[in-house]
Image (cartoon, rainbow, N blue to C red):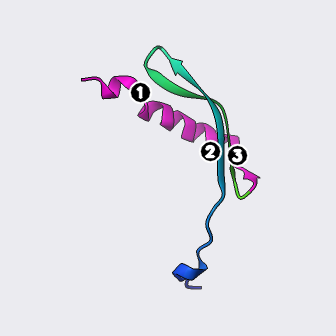
Amino acid sequence: MELTQGDVQPLAITVESGLGVLAGRQIQLIAPIVSVNGEDVPNQVVNAIATNFSQQLDLSNIEH
């Protein structure tokens, strides 16, 4: 089945999380919850995303 642009349905993505700072330099998501179209995303997926997010937002990466 071929999809055309008119067939694409937007996704309703909801993300809830607290924020913290780890070791004074790394932003950390605290107890993140993600849902797509009202369905909770499995914790393994959310934790992998949160870990990657924390690594990407290491404040030492933006120091001059």
Q: Which residue is mark 3?
A: 42
Name, please, the residue furthest toward the bottom: 1
Tag of residue 45: 2
State the separation of the CA atoms marked 1 and 2.
20 Å
State which region is magenta: 38-64
User: Residue at coordinates 63% horizontally, 41% vertically from top-left?
Assistant: 46
User: Which quarter of the image is occupied by the C terminus?
Assistant: top left
Image quadrant containing the N terminus: bottom right
Q: Nearer the viewer, mark 1 or mark 2?
A: 1
In x, y percent, where is residue 29? Answer: 58, 30
- C-alpha gap between disc 3 and disc 2: 6 Å
Residue 56, magenta (yes or no): yes
Give above or below for 45 relative to 32: below
Q: Amino acid at mark 3?
A: Pro
Q: In the picture shown, does residue 47 fall above or below 4?
A: above
Q: Residue at x 41, y 27 (%)?
A: 58
